[in-house]
Amino acid sequence: MAQFAQILKSEIVRLARKEIRSEVQSLRKAAAQYRSDIAALKRQLVEQQRRISRLEKSRPQAVAQVPDETTSLRFRAAGFLTLRQKLGVSAADMGKLIGVSAQTVYNWERGESKPRAQQLTRIAEVRKLGKRAAQERLQAEG
């Protein structure tokens, strides 16, 4: 009986090793494939970096750009509110001067939104107006 148990045990060990070997072999193949894929990706990365550096060197030098008028315009909510109060106009009238709604003017004053570049140029034009000029422009539009 002892010999039967010994044979059974050795057979179980042999089958287990056979199963483990097949599993490990597929894992080894996958790992080797992953390593080769990673190496290929690294080579591609190096080649792309070389291309980028060559393109940057061959790119013509940037021409000095003339600063655009809208880039130098700044907007502050408190300053806009002060401007409206200085001109003595309501939010609706300020909106008419700029070409936006009264709600938009309120949102700008509270800092909930900011004007677009085109609106910034209109605000800059309104800044140049005095109280009388603003009233005259409103009467001309109205």
Image (cartoon, grey):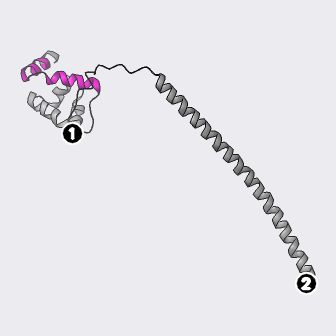
Badge 2: few (under 14), some or many (20 or more) residues near its Cα, within 10 Å? few
Q: Is residue 34 magenta?
A: no
> Which three-letter amino acid code belongs to the residue tagged 2?
Ala
- Residue 56: give x, y in percent of width and height: 47, 26
Residue under circle 2? Answer: 2
Q: Which mark is residue 66?
A: none
> In which quadrant of the rendered image does the N terminus lie?
bottom right
Tell me whether the residue at label 1 lies in contact with that at label 2, contact meaning CB atoms closer than 8 angstroms.
no
Q: Earlier in the sequence, mark 1 or mark 2?
A: 2
Residue 125 vs residue 7, the one in the foreground: 7
Residue span colored magenta? 112-138
- Residue 137: give x, y in percent of width and height: 13, 18
Q: Secondary structure at mark 1?
A: helix
Q: Is residue 49 visible?
A: yes
Q: Secondary structure at mark 2?
A: helix
- Residue 102: give x, y in percent of width and height: 21, 30
Residue under circle 1? Answer: 110
Q: Quadrant of residue 97?
A: top left
